[in-house]
């Protein structure tokens, strides 16, 4: 064995040396993937890594606008019909050709595989048909204005290779058409990719990429400070100053798509939040600026509405009310609570940035207007089922408009609860307003972008400004640090798409 | 093992619903139901446990909810990394711990003995997290000698045979060994002192045997007995303690896996981990018993 060892050590060193010569990018990530199956988990960290190996039909740029990818052009001849022209000459990493069959197969796999997390993205698609090798036709159940946005989440798998394989095999052998080919995965540690010489958008800048999973914040910071990685995501807010002091490093702050908000019980007879004046009093009585300044260290944007400005549905005319404890007290008195009341605020403690501390700050803020808040924090695994069972009257939660369109939040959080029709799954305060429901449903099927935006904005105006159905707190921001040797532009969707890094 | 598997089952059942964490927030209620059904979570706790036992007796511990692979495979795949870390840390602390403990017990009043004891006090009281971060700050960020995290090149299940692997191993092993080293120093010192008071040692001195022979041949052998017992228990502890070390150094072992799996309520992984660790304890106890017979001839009778 020793002789084998002696042979292998120089070989290994040689390998490491040759990788060092070529252009290589090392990325430190806050979380990795649990499977390489592009149809299994719909969450940012997985989508981010796999976006380098797989391609969707259309792709978001850094500011979540749609660009061609595997589909080069599209048309919408009828409100429910979409015809997409596919790119010719594209090959998968194993050499098989990309055709309409792969597209049909991928969409059907998501629909039929019970463990796919992407079902919601394709739920409105009635059927996918192959017209010819390079044309596919989609028929949606209703006119579906966000169709292209949903397509950006559906990665295309090779039918020839994978249709005869098990799901476990697909989870370990990612074969896509993307800019990088899969080389090696040591679970929980690193993923190694190498450039795809046949990439259809053009030559890649880096010859190889290493994604390292560094889930501990301090570890990630140490890795970028010591120069072991070129780029890290989700820099901890307490480490930003240290990184900025290093002359070889850049930090980037990019507004994210996730709103942190408070949800209030509006259905139990005993709930103080039945009265809109109480809900408004809370909005006035929470010192969000202090939360952003002291807890988020400035790395969050106070929210004035449901959506950040890059998301469709944003309304520039809505402004956040300024912190006004006097007004809050007055509203409480008018509502019949001159001495306030007591309430429990439930919050997760491992889901959002500083979630538990935010809940504490809200409690101390509300104490000043006479509301005594008992903060109850718990792990996300207990928190989400608890809210789903509606066993809480007041809770802190977040929503990410991952497809850049406000409809997901309007449908799931704002629309009244209607499990049968798939609305309001996260409306666990059970706010209900028929007019808002009507506007949301109309906007969901309106193919005219201007009119649709008006409907979405009006729904938001009634729900938020008039009814104060939730209390927006802030939008999370994504913080990155990278070496000055590379050119990196942070993306609104939080993904790290190496092809764009130079 | 039956009892512990049921307790884990029950706690995970009570803790929450993994499906809520597996699906994206805009999934519909029907999708949630379908997923729950496909994972068998729509059945009663007893039914689920029954199914688990039935499969487990055939060697199948279920498929991980998160990884989509057999749970036992996921755990076993990562176990070598943790075992490597724990064994090296144990070996390191044993070799240096016993040596330093003996040194201290022979000349308790010398300046170096006092220094060693001070160091061991620090080792027992400084939290692992701090030790790890201090090492990273010193050797990676400031000096740039060692990689701050991760596991190096692996050859034959371990990274201890490659240069890159060894570089990655140094800091996590030291961090993990720090507490253990301190403990073993104190332990071997006190048992050494006890042994040195025994009549047969006095006899050996009276016979005029050289001091070195007395200490390393006669005395040390007898200090090993309590040490072996403790080391056996401590090794299990070490494997459990790797959770913190693995987090700091992004080490791809089972400690990190188990924390993630508990957070994601990935029950098959947690149960499989428990089983592997229980088996490991059985093996350790067996080895400890064997070692007794080597060191202490009285046991053989």
Image (tube, coloured by chain):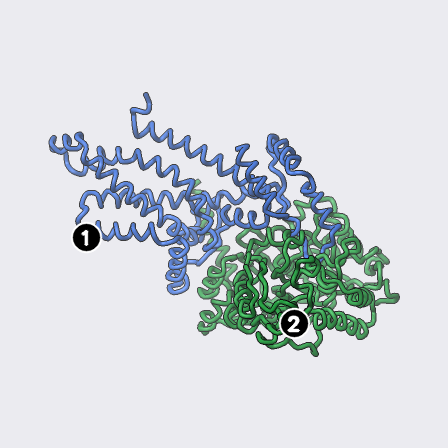
Label number found at residue B255: none
Kindly check if marks 1 and 2 are in contact, taking CB atoms under 8 A apart as contact. no
Figure check: A119 above or below A492: above
Figure check: A169 above or below A445: above
Q: Where residue B71 sits: x, y (%)?
A: 59, 41
Check the image and name the residue furthest to the bottom. Answer: A317
Note whether residue A416 is visible: yes
Tell me where residue B211 sits by quadrant: top left
Label number found at residue B111: 1
* Residue density around tag 1, few if under 14, some if 14–19, many if 20 or more, within 10 Å: few
Question: Along the line of sight, which residue is nearer the eye, B184 or A323?
Answer: A323
Q: Where residue A429 sits: x, y (%)?
A: 68, 60
Q: Where residue B241 sits: x, y (%)?
A: 43, 47
Q: Kindly identify which residue carries mark 2.
A: A334
The chain drawn in blue is B
Q: Which color is chain A depicted in?
A: green
Left or right: A75, with A52 as reference point? right
């Amino acid at each position: 064995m020793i002789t084998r060892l002696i042979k292998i050590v120089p070989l290994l060193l040689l390998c490491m040396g040759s990788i060092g010569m070529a252009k290589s990018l090392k990325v430190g990530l806050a979380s990795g993937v649990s499977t390489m199956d592009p149809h299994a988990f719909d969450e940012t960290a997985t989508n981010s890594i796999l976006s380098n190996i797989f391609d969707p039909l259309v792709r978001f740029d850094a500011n979540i606008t749609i660009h061609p990818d595997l589909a080069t052009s599209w048309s919408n001849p009828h409100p429910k019909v979409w015809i997409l022209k596919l790119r010719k000459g594209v090959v998968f990493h194993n050499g098989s050709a990309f055709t309409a069959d792969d597209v049909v197969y991928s969409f059907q796999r998501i629909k039929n595989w019970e463990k796919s997390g992407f079902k919601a993205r394709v739920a409105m698609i009635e059927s996918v048909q192959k017209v010819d090798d390079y044309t596919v036709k989609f028929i949606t159940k209703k006119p579906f204005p966000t169709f292209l946005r949903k397509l950006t989440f559906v990665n295309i798998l090779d039918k020839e290779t994978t249709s005869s394989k098990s799901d476990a095999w697909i989870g370990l052998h990612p074969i896509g058409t993307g800019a990088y080919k899969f080389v090696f995965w040591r679970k929980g540690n690193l993923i190694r990719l190498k450039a795809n010489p046949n990439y259809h958008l053009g030559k890649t800048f880096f010859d190889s990429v290493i994604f390292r999973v560094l889930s501990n914040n301090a570890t990630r910071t140490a890795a970028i400070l010591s120069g072991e990685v070129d780029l890290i995501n989700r820099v901890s807010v307490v480490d930003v100053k240290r990184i900025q002091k290093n002359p070889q490093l850049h930090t980037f702050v990019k507004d994210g798509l996730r709103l942190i908000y408070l949800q209030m019980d509006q259905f139990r007879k005993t709930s103080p939040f039945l009265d809109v004046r109480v809900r408004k009093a809370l909005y006035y009585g929470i010192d969000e600026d202090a939360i952003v300044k002291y807890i988020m260290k400035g790395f969050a944007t106070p929210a004035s509405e449901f959506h950040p400005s890059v998301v469709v549905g944003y309304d520039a005319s809505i402004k956040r009310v300024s912190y006004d404890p006097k007004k809050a007290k007055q509203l409480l008195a008018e509502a019949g609570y001159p001495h306030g009341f007591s309430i429990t605020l439930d919050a997760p403690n491992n889901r959002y940035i500083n979630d538990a501390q935010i809940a504490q700050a809200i409690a101390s803020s509300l104490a000043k207007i006479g509301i005594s808040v008992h903060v109850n924090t718990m792990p996300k695994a207990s928190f989400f089922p608890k809210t789903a069972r509606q066993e809480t009257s007041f809770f802190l939660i977040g929503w990410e408009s991952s497809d850049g369109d406000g409809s997901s939040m309007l449908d799931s959080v704002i629309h009244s609860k209607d499990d049968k029709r798939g609305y309001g799954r996260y409306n666990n305060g059970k706010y209900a307003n028929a007019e808002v429901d009507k506007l949301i449903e109309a906007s969901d099927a309106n193919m005219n972008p201007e009119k649709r935006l008006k409907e979405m904005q009006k729904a938001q105006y009634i729900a938020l400004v008039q009814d104060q159905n939730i209390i927006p707190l802030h939008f999370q921001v994504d913080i990155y640090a990278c070496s000055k040797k590379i050119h990196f532009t942070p993306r609104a969707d939080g993904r790290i798409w190496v092809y764009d890094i130079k | 093992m039956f009892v512990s598997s049921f307790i884990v089952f029950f706690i995970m059942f009570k803790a929450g619903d993994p499906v809520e964490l597996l699906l994206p927030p805009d999934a519909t209620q029907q999708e949630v139901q379908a997923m729950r059904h496909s994972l068998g979570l729509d059945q009663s706790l007893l039914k689920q446990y029954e199914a688990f036992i039935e499969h487990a007796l055939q060697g199948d511990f279920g498929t991980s909810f998160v990884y989509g692979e057999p749970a036992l495979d996921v755990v076993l795949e990562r176990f070598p990394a943790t075992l490597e870390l724990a064994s090296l840390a144990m070996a390191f602390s044993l070799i240096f711990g016993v040596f330093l403990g003996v040194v201290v017990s022979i000349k308790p009043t010398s300046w170096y003995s006092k220094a060693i004891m001070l160091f061991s006090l620090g080792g027992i009281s400084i939290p692992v997290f701090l030790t790890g971060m201090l090492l990273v700050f010193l050797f990676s960020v400031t000096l740039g000698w060692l990689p701050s995290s991760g596991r190096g090149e692996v050859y034959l299940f371990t990274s201890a045979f490659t240069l890159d692997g060894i570089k990655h191993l140094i800091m996590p092993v030291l961090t993990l060994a720090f507490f253990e080293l301190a403990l073993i120093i104190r332990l071997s010192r006190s048992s050494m002192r006890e042994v040195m008071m025994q009549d047969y040692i006095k006899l050996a001195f009276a016979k005029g045997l050289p001091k070195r022979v007395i200490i390393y041949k006669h005395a040390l052998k007898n200090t090993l007995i309590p040490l072996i017992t403790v080391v056996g228990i401590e090794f299990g502890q070490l494997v459990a303690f790797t959770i913190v070390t693995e987090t700091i150094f992004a080490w791809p072992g089972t400690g990190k896996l188990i924390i993630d799996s508990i957070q994601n309520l990935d029950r098959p992984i947690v149960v499989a981990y428990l089983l592997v660790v229980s088996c490991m304890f059985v093996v350790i106890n067996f080895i400890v018993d064997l070692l007794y017979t080597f060191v202490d001839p009285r046991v053989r009778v």
